[in-house]
């Protein structure tokens, strides 16, 4: 019991502070974005970014959300970097996380290559389109649409109920043609679970939208991939989460190249973010059994909603 | 044994290549970054100069600071800022490498659908990487 109290209290305190900071000090970062941060040494920002992303990584794992979706709205609120560079770094944070998690998930058969390839092809094309549109939009429009998207994600996360083992009696024709089915070993059930999918054309259409939004805002898209795989296509939850990570690695690669060509990737911002987030994710995974994940998840959703609200206010020039 | 039961040979190959290439990618970006911030090699733009302008839009930033973008850095690999950028370019190429490796495997298994899907996927990523569609440098 005591073991659970300390990390839970710490995480609770940290998240509550962040929510209040986001809501009560809306002008600090806006001011920072309109003028150079000459008064603070560059290395202070580098260390701050690393430490901040380290905690963001811990919170992301415990809250059960991808680091990418937290990164863009929160870092663009607290740091003096232009949102173009934050989105570029956000894509690389999500990409590097997906690349390092991908191999074991594929080996265990939790991520399914054929399911991922079928969805990623169409989603990666739209993520390139999203990245190009996102980098061409005026800053206030980016903030407004980012704010609205983040608020929407908070609602989805609050309301969505996953189905661990959807029962699909008859697969659709397209999924049969594409040979999308599989079998994985479920450690909770301690047995092999076979699965198949339905509504493949609807899933493909939804992945066009998801890819576009991920490219446009530099967000990881696990928040959308998982519900579509699980609730629309009927993929078991574990396979949905693992395959979503694989799809992320393809989509974010496509969008990352657009950001690289548009000059929206600065190693000085991207690398401390990636390193901090990866380290935090590892620590977070260890803390996972010691904290009340449901409470933390609700606070993370509140944090996302506050960040979304703040982006919306920035978009309106408030 | 269990791995082979639940994952196809192609999937296992992808996973093995991904494991190596992504680990190398993480090592490269951290090494490249350290070389840059400690300026162990000559650099055209110092971190302090970048920090003066990182509040600007990417398009305006590049008019003010000559940092690498797209592929315009290839002939200047001896610079520490370029080396750090090149490590990120490598990380962004990992998925392409993994996909390219599995094309012959799908072909060998006579899996026409996934041979075509994977070739198309690689082409999409290569087009993005060349900068043709994003008006890159």
Image (cartoon, rainbow, N blue to C red):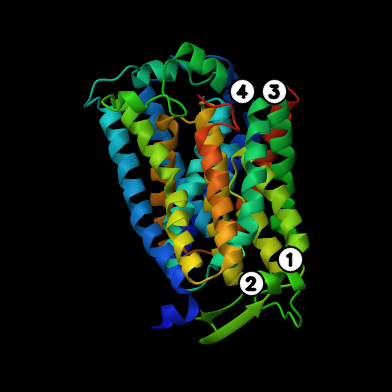
Q: Residue furthest bottom?
A: A191
Give the residue number, with chain letter if any, for mark 2.
A180
Q: Residue furthest left?
A: B40
List x then y, in percent, for residue A194: 60, 82
Q: Callout 4: 10 Å neighbours few (<14), some, many (20+)?
A: many
Element carrying mark 2: loop
Report, in whole angstroms, how far the alpha carbon at label 4 lies from the one at label 2. Answer: 47 Å
Q: Name the residue rendered at 42%, 69% in the picture.
A: B12
CB of mark 3 within 8 Å of CB of mark 4? no
Give the residue number, with chain letter if any, for mark 4.
A30
Element carrying mark 3: loop
Residue at mark 1: chain: A
Tell me the mark number nearer the camera, choosing from 3 and 4.
3
Q: Is residue B103 visible?
A: yes
Is the same chain shared between marks 2 and 1?
yes
Give the residue number, with chain letter if any, for mark 3.
A138
Q: Earlier in the sequence, mark 3 or mark 1?
A: 3
A207 is higher (above) or lower (below) than A170? above
Is the same chain shared between marks 3 and 4?
yes
Report, in whole angstroms, how far the alpha carbon at label 2 lies from the one at label 3. Answer: 41 Å
List x then y, in percent, for residue A242: 54, 65
Q: Is A120 in front, or is A99?
A: A120
Tell me the mark number nearer the camera, choosing from 4 and 1.
1
Element carrying mark 1: helix
Q: Earlier in the sequence, mark 2 or mark 1?
A: 2
Tell me the mark number nearer the camera, choosing from 4 and 2.
2
Residue at mark 3: chain: A
Q: Earlier in the sequence, mark 4 or mark 1?
A: 4
Give the residue number, with chain letter if any, for mark 1.
A200
Q: Callout 2: 10 Å neighbours few (<14), some, many (20+)?
A: many
Tell me where residue A29 sits by quadrant: top right
């Amino acid at each position: 019991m005591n073991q659970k109290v300390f990390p839970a209290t710490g995480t609770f305190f940290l998240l509550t502070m962040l929510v209040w900071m986001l809501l009560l000090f809306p002008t600090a970062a806006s001011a920072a974005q309109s003028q150079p941060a000459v008064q603070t040494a560059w290395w202070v920002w580098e260390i701050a970014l690393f430490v901040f992303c380290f905690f963001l990584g811990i919170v992301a794992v415990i809250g059960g959300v991808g680091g990418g979706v937290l990164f863009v709205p929160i870092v663009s609120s607290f740091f003096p970097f232009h949102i173009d560079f934050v989105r570029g770094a956000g894509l690389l944070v999500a990409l590097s996380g997906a690349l390092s998690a991908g191999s074991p998930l594929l080996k265990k058969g939790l991520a399914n290559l054929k399911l991922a390839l079928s969805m990623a092809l169409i989603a990666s094309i739209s993520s390139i389109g999203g990245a190009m549109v996102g980098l061409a939009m005026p800053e206030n429009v980016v903030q407004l649409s980012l704010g609205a998207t983040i608020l929407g994600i908070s609602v989805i996360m609050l309301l969505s109920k996953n189905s661990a083992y959807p029962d699909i009696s008859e697969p659709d024709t397209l999924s049969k043609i594409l040979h999308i089915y599989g079998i994985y070993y479920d450690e909770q059930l301690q047995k092999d679970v076979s699965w198949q999918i339905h509504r493949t054309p609807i899933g493909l259409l939804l992945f066009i939208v998801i890819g576009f939004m991920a490219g446009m805002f530099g967000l990881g898209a696990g928040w959308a991939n998982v519900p579509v795989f699980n609730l629309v296509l009927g993929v078991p939850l574990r396979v949905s989460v693992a395959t979503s990570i694989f799809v992320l690695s393809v989509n974010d690669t496509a969008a990352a190249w657009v950001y690289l060509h548009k000059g929206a990737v600065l190693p000085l911002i991207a690398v401390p973010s990636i390193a901090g987030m990866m380290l935090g994710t590892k620590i977070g995974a260890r803390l996972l059994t010691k904290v009340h994940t449901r409470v933390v998840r609700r606070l993370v959703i509140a944090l996302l909603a506050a960040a979304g609200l703040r982006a919306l206010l920035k978009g309106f020039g408030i | 044994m269990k791995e082979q039961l639940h994952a196809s040979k192609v999937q296992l190959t992808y996973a093995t290549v991904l494991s190596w290439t992504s680990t190398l990618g993480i090592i490269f970006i951290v090494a490249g970054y350290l070389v840059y911030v400690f300026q162990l090699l000559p650099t055209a733009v110092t971190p302090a100069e970048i920090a003066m302008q990182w509040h600007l839009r990417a398009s305006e930033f590049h008019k003010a600071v000559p940092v690498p973008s797209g592929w315009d850095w290839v002939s200047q690999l001896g610079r520490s800022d370029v080396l750090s950028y090149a490590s990120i370019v490598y990380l962004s190429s990992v998925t392409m490498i993994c996909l390219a490796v599995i094309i012959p495997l799908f072909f060998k298994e006579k899996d026409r659908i996934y041979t075509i899907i994977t070739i198309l996927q690689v082409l999409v990523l290569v087009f993005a990487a060349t900068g043709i569609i994003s008006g890159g440098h």
